[in-house]
Image: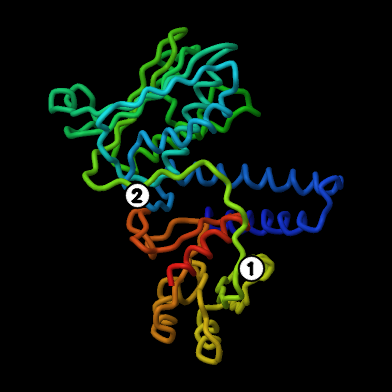
């Protein structure tokens, strides 16, 4: 269902983006397309949250310094919670590394800060803190589900309204929410829980009515060199240099949209609606094919099998896999192998342009 739903959203979002390109910024019609695009993005986000809770989100873990990555998010988080709420950042010293997908850390912080903001009426304070902690056997006996070991602790606290035991017992349930119908889906904390569990961590919540809330996330220590945190900046659209790309997608609407987007980015396009036809195209094509973009889930032959066959014809051919749902064919328990390029449907033209350029520049 996630695959089919995200395919439909891909067509809606991409068509809206392409339509907006030809419109003046002041045109009323552009506002309508903007509304369509925003609604589709909200629907896509709900699907991602469900996949995250089910631990079916495709991830590319990296070794991180949590302090660096939290600091790179602070500007955005301050905008998110508003000027009336003070955001305090208390980084621990000598922090150990953790291994997780940086985008998952962004999702955790954004959801916890939004919940903290909504729990505060008027002026208040949100505190983000990191430290290291070693859990022993005695602690784990008192906290079912925890295991002994060395962890990096990330906590987000607020001085808001707090929660009673009845609410606390249900906060990680999908679709459980205390907010108004138009204010939340009840998926934020469920997604946080799913992400933490997917990364072999634990979550503990402390809260009392009128005494605020503190959510503590324990992430396992990882001993390795960290990678540099990404700045919170929006990349400009990266254009092609006339390279030839073969796109294989069994959904004809998505194939048509992909062709339009990539041609608009100055790439030369070959397309196929079926894997077996794609093999014939490659055998007959006289020029060089620089990149393969293929759906993962297709009839008769999946994306990785197709890539393997095409790479036997064109050695060194790089590949980008795309799907609306994580597939064991390209990942193990949702974790991508090193060097595998993957883009989650639905995606924007900007996201597509970025990953295509990245894959091509590796050759």
Q: Which residue is mark 2?
A: 62
Front position in the image: 212 or 333: 212
Where residue 32 sits in the image (x, y, percent)?
Answer: 80, 46
Dot 1 surroundings within 10 Å: few (below 14), some, or many (20 or more)? Answer: many
- In the rendered image, which quarter is residue 166 located in? top left
Instruction: For marks 2 and 1, give the CA distance.
Output: 29 Å
Residue at the limit of the structure toward the top, as seen here: 210
For residue 70, side relative to residue 78 (left or right)? left
Residue 260 in the image: state x and y as whole percent. 69, 68
**Towards the viewer: 91 or 338:** 91
Helix, strand or loop for disc 2: strand
Q: In the rendered image, which residue does mark 1 sit on? A: 262
Which quadrant of the view contains residue 195? top left
- Looking at the image, residue 144 lies above or below residue 347: above
Name the residue located 57 percent from the left edge and 71 percent from the top edge. 249
Q: Earlier in the sequence, mark 2 or mark 1?
A: 2
Compared across the picture, whether 12 is left or right of 356 comes to right
Drawn side of residue 137 relative to residue 125, left or right: left
User: SS of the residue at dot 1?
Assistant: helix
Q: Residue at x 45, y 45 (%)?
A: 230
């Amino acid at each position: 269902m996630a695959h089919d739903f995200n395919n439909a959203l891909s067509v809606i979002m991409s068509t809206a983006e392409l339509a907006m390109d030809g419109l003046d910024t002041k045109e009323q019609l552009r506002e309508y397309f903007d509304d369509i695009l925003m609604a589709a993005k909200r629907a896509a986000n709900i699907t991602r949250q469900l996949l995250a809770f089910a631990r079916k989100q495709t991830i590319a873990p990296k070794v991180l310094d949590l302090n660096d990555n939290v600091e790179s998010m602070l500007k955005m988080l301050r905008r998110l919670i508003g000027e009336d709420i003070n955001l305090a950042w208390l980084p621990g010293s000598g922090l150990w590394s953790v291994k997780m997908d940086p985008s998952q850390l962004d999702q955790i912080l954004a959801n916890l800060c939004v919940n903290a903001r909504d729990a505060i009426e008027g002026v208040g304070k949100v505190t983000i803190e990191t430290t290291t902690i070693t859990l022993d056997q005695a602690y784990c006996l008192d906290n079912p589900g925890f295991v002994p070991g060395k962890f990096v602790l990330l906590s987000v606290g607020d001085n808001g309204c707090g929660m009673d035991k009845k609410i606390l017992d249900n906060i990680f349930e999908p679709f459980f929410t205390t907010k108004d119908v138009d204010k939340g889906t009840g998926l934020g904390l469920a997604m946080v829980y799913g992400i933490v569990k997917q990364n072999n961590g634990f979550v503990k919540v402390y809260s009392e009515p009128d005494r605020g809330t503190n959510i503590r996330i324990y992430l396992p220590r990882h001993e390795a060199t960290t990678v540099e945190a990404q700045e919170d900046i929006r990349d400009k659209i990266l254009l092609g240099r006339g390279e030839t790309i073969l796109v294989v997608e069994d959904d004809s609407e998505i194939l048509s949209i992909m062709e339009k987007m990539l041609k608009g980015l100055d790439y030369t396009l070959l397309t196929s609606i079926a894997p077996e036809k794609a093999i014939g195209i490659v055998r007959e094509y006289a020029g060089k094919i620089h990149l393969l973009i293929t759906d993962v889930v297709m009839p008769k032959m999946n994306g990785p099998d197709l890539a393997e066959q095409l790479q036997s014809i064109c050695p060194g051919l790089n590949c980008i896999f795309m799907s609306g749902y994580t597939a064991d064919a390209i990942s193990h328990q949702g974790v991508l192998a090193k060097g595998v390029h993957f883009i989650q449907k639905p995606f924007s033209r900007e996201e597509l342009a970025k990953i295509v350029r990245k894959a091509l520049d590796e050759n």
